[in-house]
Structure formats: structure tokens, C-alpha cells
Image: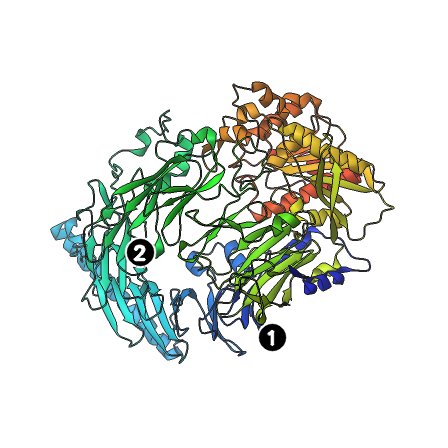
Amino acid sequence: MRNLLCIPLLLLAGLHASAQKKPLTHAVYDGWQSINERYISNNGKWVVYTITPQEGDATLVIQAIDRSYRKEIPRGYAAEITDDDRFVICKIKPLFAATREAKIKKKKPDEMPKDSLAIVKLGKDSVLRIPRIKSFKMPEKGTGQWLAYLQEKALPVPPVVAQPDSATQLNSLLHMADSLARVADSLRNKANEAKTKGLAALKTPKKDANPKPGEPVEEGTELVLRNLYTGEEKKFPLVSDYYFSKPGYTFIIETSRSNTDTLKKAAIVWYNTLNGKADTIFRGYNSAKSFAFDEAGAQLAFIAERDSSTKALQKFYKLYYYRTGMDSARMRVDRNTTGVRNGLTLSETLVPEFSQNGQKLFFGLMPIRKPKDTTLVDFETARLDIWHYNDDYLQPQQLVQLNTELQRSYKAVLNGNDDKVIQLGAEDAENIILADDKNADYVLATTTKGNRVESQWQGFAKTTAYIISTIDGSRKLVKEKQRNFFTISPGGKYVIWYDPSQKNYITYTVSTGVITNITKNIRVPLYDEEDDHPDDPLPHGIVAWHQNDKYVYIYDKYDVWQCDPEAKEASRNLTEGNGRMHKIIYRYTQTDKEEKFITDTQTVVFKTLNEVTKQNGLAFHYMKGPLIPGYSLSGKFQIGFLVVKAKAAKRYLFTSESYNVSPVLETLLDTMFEVTDIQFDDNRKLYRDSLLVSPLYASNPQQKDYNWLTCELVKWTMFDGKQSEGLLFKPENFDAKKKYPMILYFYEKNSDDLYTYRPPAPSASTINIPLFVSNGYLVFVPDIHYKKGEPGESAYNSVVSAAKYFTKKPWVDSTKMAIQGQSWGGYQVAYLVTRTNMFAAAEAGAPVSNMTSAYGGIRWGTGVNRQFQYERTQSRIGYTLWQRPDLYIKNSPLFRADKVTTPLLITHNDADGAVPWYQGIEYFTALRRLGKKVWMLQYNGEDHNLVERRNRKDLSIRLSQYFDYFLKGAPAPHWLAEGVPATSKGVDWGMELEEKKGF
């Protein structure tokens, strides 16, 4: 395989050499950039991307690949390039400062600053800006001609009051005096009338009540349909939503009724963009939604309700259908339609969908639920949850999933013009997967019914699969009670799953019902052979299918295998063992979001990782040519998550980065050509290649002004005699003659991330490595290797052995070493301080301190019980609490709290949805009672990791203050020295530094 180093990235790395540089501070966070949105035109000549600071106003950039054109749109986002490569459309956010000011003033939603729309003709400098827009849409696969945008409510126009002249003002005063005299005369007359007729004469007669035009609705706003080629616009009032068909020839407009004009009813309008003709196909409804076109844009399905009031507790929706040539949409399905079982009605939550050939219409049915009894008095009725041992799920999980279950729908289908409903989904077939672009006369159905209780301790529910006919609803069993997921091939010919008991992939041929082990002759493991959990190892997974279901591609640890789904043809290694031979992991990356399968003529793209050097790259393989070598670029960098290909050109767009190079947006041109004078033995033509890599934008140029970091892979021998590895971060200005404090941060294994870029950012839970290293710390991130039943000692074996290794380095201050971790890392920190006193300080985020109480606890974010976590997954105990209580106690820091001498900072938030908050409290109160140095930060309303940026900034400062005090001898902040009482909450945050310095 010919390699091409990413030259532009390596050159950029050289820019960081240098003179004295300043350390990073917490003030740099907001301006640090990321490259977010990124798009490439179909012809591969234009790219669009956003440069987004962590806080503040982003910039959208439109750029020509050849650098002949560059246009910036301040605050632009949500961009789209038209299919004809002529225009870019995007929204423009209001100024960050303006939105912030409006929030401070607590302005109403209608008064908040609104988005604008920008239209840019590629290659031109002018920008058409349209203020106050809600949304815009374009056809998914149109010509690029049409754009529609919905405007915000028009701002009220203040009345213009003319200033009267002096004569007019005098006349007005005289007129007012005459009016007051007449009022006085009227009151006298009324009083005289009351004397003769009584006080009843003073009562105001009742006016006849005018009939209400209807319950108020949220009125739609003005919609504009714009022809981008001509600039012509057509406007539609009172529009609440709108939809293009994929080709863009048809445009649906949904309008609301007017609150002031009873003649203006809610309506659905079918607009033909070819001839400009508009037809109203449906009117007079309360609610219409879930609009769906067929592929050609000739058929439309939607869900509507027109019989109940707005506030009705129970509404019955119906499925309506329209196709070109009909006068109006007609109802096709309601709860009384043939095939709809008693107790079911049309689902309002499942969007209808047509098969690609337009012959099938899929939709949902849902149970009719009893409405709430509004006659009951709320404060007189009991409020409780009832737990039952036969429930499928525990009550907390039921409550988390409540909205999902209330909206649970069962898929059904109409075939052609037949109005008989064929129900496919059911309580025992809750998941339906369509096949062959939804054209197949069957679907794959899966269910976990009858197997859900044991998920409490297994962490999964076994699944049963069926093939269900879309013609008559009949079922064929595929396989019962399997652990792993079932999927169906794109063409619908095969169902495939991984069987952990056989450690192989199994297929079911739909046409014959034959079940085949298709990987039994592959001699390398297809599962994670290094998995150290007390459970079946997980498979490496399926890559993709080949066109026409000819092959299925499957991963081993390194390579990709091409397998015949009926095992008639021997499996072959697509990467020809290159991965295992050279310790390179190949992982397929999909460059086209619409891709359904791999084709014969496709160039497939793999991301690569060298397991030894940790170098990353991209490998390109032309499916019609030799298997390998293909061609690749690789080096001391990492490729970003997305790799995007231009639809009509061999041009790719991606980002690359390294530990010292902020993400660079790059394009790669595939210039493969065919050499016809060389033949393989089997007469396949040889393809040669070249790669042209070009950088477009390098983010965060300000990084060159700061003392950055270096990163290196370090190997050492653990206490058990085995070798491990980890990442050592040093300051860019590292001096081997100095001694540095060191923080060890860990979770499980992180060494593969050697070339990952880590930006300065406020912490969600862990130390920000660039910030600490820039300020004179060393940071080491060791890999941890686990043994069943010994998670605590496994951490000791890995982390403490690494710390001991570094104490022998002359540039490490062995008296100023600390440990930090969050969640599972926080548990390990909490455990390690009970086993050693070699660390000067420790911070544990969201730690489990007592496995005996955590074992039966709830992960409140999902509502699931934690038992499976200890028996099978991350905690790695491998037994129930009653089988091996000794292991739970041995691995619980709480039971060794009296052994702690290391100062410990705990962070545990009161809305933690993963580790119960009381785990932090148990440890804190034990250590406090024992007179240990312990603090706990509890962020109110925050989850497992901090979400709110204000809290992240706060934690970042406190982590710096904490470690600076114990490892650098800096002054202690007031919160650390004295605490902050509840009486000062919200007034004093305790950040100010005491005069007395630390140790």
C-alpha cells in the first residue's frame, strides 16, 4: 500500500516552534474555535463550513476549492448548497450580544431577536438578506430552482399621530367641554328617572352576544416561494407548514384558519411549480400533520383530525390520501376501516411512508387510551407508583419511557388501491424493519416480549424475529431468543445476526427459510478478543452489504471479510490480511449519507489506525480493481468523524488534527487512472493512483501564541509483570532539568487517542489537559487492564505502577503527584486513595463508593437497575451480591474509608442520572466523620456531567485552584480553606484566594 503523508498538516505543526509563549488561562475558552458544519457541492468545486467559537458569533464560509473565491457570512448556519451548484442558502442568527441582552431583559418570545435568511450566488460577492424568517426548505433532489421560506409574525406598526396646530387644539378643548356638558345633562336625566322608576333604571341593558368565530388558533404567517433563477416570488398568507416533493415539482402548503375572518378556513393546497397552478385538496380541519410524498411527488398521505374541539381529551385521527387527478384528498383509514382491530385507532405520531415504487403506504396504529377523568379533584386523589414483580420493566424505567409508550405505534400497510389494512406490528412484534426500499412483500419484525424482566440483571433482553407478509399479515419465525440484533439486507433477501454462543454470523434466507452459519470457516475471531468484561465478548460488527445482497462485509479486529450470505462461496479477506499483518485497524466510513450498499464500481474509504504507532489515516480501495494495495494517506494525525464525498466528483472533504495541531479542513482529490498495458493473471486491469491533498482552513491560529503541549506514547511494566501503555503530555517548553508536578487522569483505555486534538474548554467533569499542561503540569493518561472481580486492584495495578514508574524520572516531583477521574474514573480514584498515600491530592467525580448499595440502585437517567453493571459490564464483579458479597465489600472504597490520608475533592451533582447522588454523600460523610480532608461540589440540577456552561466554567476554576494549592503551593481559595455556608449561597462563591500559601 502506497502511503502519502498529510504534508499540509505536518507543515502546520512546524509553525508552533518558538520563543517565549504565554500560558493558557480560563479566559481563552470562549474564543476557541471548532469547524462544525461542512458541505461540498455536487461538482466538488465549492465547500461551505462554519467556524464556531465556544461562545459568541460563528462565521459561515463559502469557498472555492481552487481558492479563487471566499465569502464569509457572519453568524450564518444551517446552510444548503443547491443541487445545481449555483446557490448557497443559509440562516443568519441574531448577534449573540443582542440575544443575551434580550434574555437579561426577559423579553417575550415574539420580542426576541429573530433569524434572517441569506441567499448567495456562488462566485458572486452580493448577499440577499431577508429578515425575520422562521425556516426555509428546498427540494431534496430538485434542480436547484426553488426555495421556500416562512416568515415570522410581522412586527406591529405603531400608529402615527399627527401633531395638531394651536387652532385645532383650542377647538378640541371647546369640543371636549361641550361633550362634558352633555354627559352632565345625561346624568341629571338618569337621576330624575331613577326617582320615579327606581334604581333599575340605572342598569345597563344586556347586549346580544355575538357568536364566537371559533376557538383561537396559532395563526400561520406569510410564506414566500422564490424562483432562484428569475428572482420571482409568490406569497401565501396564514401558512403554518410547507413541504416539497423530492423532485420539487409539487409543493404542499398547509394554512391555518384566521381568528378574525371566519371565511378563511384551514386548508391544504397542492401547488404545481411547473405551471404555477394551485388546488385546494383539503379544508376545514382542526389539525393536519405528518405529510408524506411518494418518490415521484405524485401521491400524498397525511394525518388529520376535524371532528373534535381543541381542548378535547381524546381525538381520533384519520389517514387521508391524494394523488394527481383527484378533486380532493379522501379518507382511507380510520378506526372503523377493515383490518383495524378493536381497541386501535390511527396513530398520530408515526409519519406515513410510501414504498419506492409507490405501491405500498405504511402508517401506524395505536391503542385507544382511556382519557383522564377531569371530574376528579387533583388534591383529593392519591399519587403513587405501584411496583409489581411481573412488570416487564421497573417503575422508574416505565416512567422514563412513558412518553414513548404513550406514543407506541404498530406499523400497518395499505397495498395499492386496496383499502383493507394489513397490520404488521403488534405487542409481540413491536419493531418493524422495511426492506428493498420498502417494496418487499414482507418485513422483518422483532420483539423482546416475554424476555424483558431479566434485562434488569443481564443488561439486555433476548430478541425473537419474524418475517411478516405485507399481503396478508402472516408470520414466519426466523429465530427465537437471540442476544444480538437482527437486521435485514437492503434487498430483503436475508436476515442476519451474530450468535454469541457460536461466535459466528448467521443468515436466514427469506425465500427458503434456510439458516446458515456464514463465517464458520474464518479462522480469526470476529469478536473482541481483548474484551475483559465478565460476559460474552461483543462482535466487531457488520460493515455493509453489497449491491443486490451479493455479499455481506464483516469486521474482525483488523480486517474486513467479504462473505457469501448463503456460504456457497468461500469468505475472503477484502483487505487481504494487511490489517492483522501490520497491526492496522480498517474501519469503513460512509461518505454518502444516501448510500444503501457498496457497488461494484465504488471507491470505498476506510479510516485506519495503526495499533502500535497510533497513527491514523484514510485508505481508499477501488472495488473493481485489486483488493489491496489500494492507496492511502496516513501519518501522525487523526481524521475527523465525517468524511464527505462530492456526488459527481472524486473529491472528499474532511478534517485532520493532531495533539498539537488544531483541526484543519482539507480536501482530497482522487485522481486514480487506469493502466491498460499491465494485466493480472486473472485478466483484471491494474489501477494506479495519486492523491492530491489541499488544506482549506486551519482553525485557531491564536494557538501559536500559547505554551501548548506535546504528547508521547509511554510503555511501562505493571505490578503483575505485564506491559501497559499510556499518553504523557508535557508542556511545549518542557525542560528536563526542572521538576514538574504530575496529574494522572484515567478512565479505561485511551492510548489510541495519541493524535487527538484536545481544545481548551471549560470542564464538564475532568481536568482540561491543555490548560493544566500549559501551566506547568505533566499529565499522564494510563490504560487500565481489568481482571474479573478485581476492578479496584486492577486500577491499582495499572495506575499506581505507572505513578511509581514516573517517580524515577528526574523531571517528575514525586511529592507532588495527584489523580483525577470522573464516573468510572471517579470510582477508581475513590478506591486508590484507600490503597496508597503516595498522592498529594485527588479528585473523584461522581464516584461509586459503596457497591453494596449501588448494586440495587437506579440509573435515574434511563430508569434501569444497576445490577447488570456489576455482574456483566463495566464494574466487572461477575457475581451477584449474594453470591460474592466479599467482592462487593472489597471493591467498595467506603469500607476502607479509615485508610484514606490523601486530601480528596468529590464532585457529585444532585440530578445525576447515572451514578446515584447518595454515593458521593456516603463517602463524604464517612470521611468527614473520620476527620479526613474532604470537600464535595454539588451543582444544582446538573446531571452526571455538567451541561450548563456557567457551571463548567466554575468547575474549571475550582479544579485549577484545588490542584494549584496542593501541587504548587498556591494560595487556597476561600471555598477550599473555609467553605461557603448556605447563608452565603448565591452571594459569595468563595473563589477569592487566601493570603496563606499551600504546601
At a point 32% along the width and 53% down the height, the residue shown is: 351
List the residue tagged with mark 1: 66
Left or right: 990 with respect to 628?
right
Sequence-first tag of 1 and 2: 1
Which scheme is used to colour this image of the protein? rainbow
Name the amino acid, label 2: Asn
Residue 624 seen in this snapshot: yes
Q: Which of marks 1 and 2 is in front?
A: 2
Name the amino acid, label 1: Asp
Residue 816 seen in this snapshot: no
List the residue tagged with mark 2: 439
Q: Which of 170 and 206 is in front in this view?
A: 206
Mark 1, secondary structure of its residue: loop
Query: For the residues marked 1 and 2, what is the alpha-carbon distance in whole angstroms?
Result: 43 Å
Q: Which mark is residue 965?
A: none
Left or right: 433 with respect to 986?
left
Mark 2, secondary structure of its residue: loop
For residue 897, which quarter of the picture? top right
For residue 743, which quarter of the picture? top right
